[in-house]
Amino acid sequence: MGRANAAYYAGQDPFGDFTTAPEISQVFGELIGAWAAIAWAAMGSPAPVILAEAGPGRGSLMADARRLTARVAPEFHAACAVHFIETSPRLRAEQEARIPEAHWHDDLSGLPDGPLILIGNEFLDALPIRQFRVVDGAWFERHVSGTGFVEMPCDPQPGLPPEEADPQGILERNEPAERFVASLSQRIATMGGIALLIDYGGLTNPGDSLQAIRAKRMAPPLENAGEADLTALVDFGAVSRAALAQGAAVQGPVTQGAFLTALGILPRAIKLAAGRPETEAAAIMGAARRLVEPTAMGRLFKVIAITPTGFPPLPGLAA
Ligand code: SAH
């Protein structure tokens, strides 16, 4: 999955196949920019501050956030040094066209030391999972062989009881996501900082959630490796435990709908739509609703913040 996605993000235009919240509405990035400015004030307004994004895609979220902070939070705006964690050369080029002053890194360890605000939207879901299946009370791991699975005896972690599998007997683990969150949380617990992670998923092992999208459609995940976007639901329970284990605190998860509604997405969209031609105004409102409505992206997507312990509640994250 890791190799297939690396090839996919490096070789294809992923946004021809799927869309994401920042591509749907500029309001998404704007609200996150405003959120980051408030989080920065709660950190004691450190200057400079590292404003980092993991997996920034086209750079739209950051461009929308920066446009807003330049206008409404000039001190925060001036204090920010923008850093991107991105492995795809192709997407790096798109990001550079929009945020030329950014700095790029292959992973978290490349970020300089110092106060940090890190954003990650649909980053963790792109990292490679492992799948396990319980057969007669024993764990097997699924490996890919040709276009099918072969299963070999293997415990997901030593001593894990078979009851941890879902009703179909499946357990999915995203160890790179857990490791990313653990390093991030260790840094936050020791050096300070805040992270905001947004992704689709739930609070437990998702079961078999591996999916592929190719040419805008669901496709068989094991076919055409490197030509489809492979993702899996994020287990926010596992992610939160990884953060807590490093001595950081977690706010949320809350649904994306609750988060964006608390940040004022609808009034902001109404303001943007005011005075525009009818079809344009309807598109602006429709895009904002798609992000918050439970049957669209509002319920499936969850939001958490990782902070040092004892940090005051951040906007939108009260359960
Ligand atoms: N956040 C963007 C893009 C989401 S797609 C948006 O919401 O539109 C996933 C992003 O993560 C892409 O930019 C992809 O190139 C990047 N990515 C995937 N795996 C990565 C890895 N292991 N390290 C760094 N970036 C990665």
Image (spheres, rainbow, N blue to C red):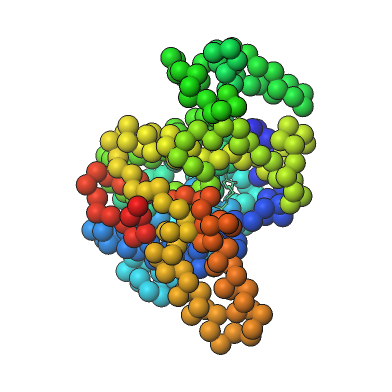
Seen from the viewer's position, the closer of residues 184 and 236 is: 236
Q: Is residue 238 visible?
A: yes
Question: Which quadrant does the N terminus fall into?
Answer: top right
In this view, 208 is above or below 154: below
Number of dots carrying numbers: 0
Point out the residue furthest to the front here. Answer: 167
Residue 115, horizontal then vertical, whole percent: 31, 50
Q: Residue shown at 51%/61% (left/top)?
A: 292
Point out the residue furthest to the bottom here. Answer: 275
Q: Is residue 61 visible?
A: no
In this view, 36 is above or below 10: below
Q: Residue shown at 53%/57% (left/top)?
A: 294
Q: Residue shown at 30%/42% (left/top)?
A: 249
Relative to residue 62, is residue 304 drawn left or right? left
Q: Residue shown at 63%/36% (left/top)?
A: 210
In this view, 247 is above or below 292: above
Seen from the viewer's position, the closer of residues 306 and 68 is: 306
Residue 184, horizontal then vertical, whole percent: 38, 40
Residue 246, horizontal then vertical, whole percent: 31, 33
In this view, 246 is above or below 291: above
Quarter of image, res 224: top right
Relative to residue 313, is residue 274 drawn left or right? right
Residue 118, horizontal then vertical, whole percent: 41, 50
Quarter of image, res 59: bottom right
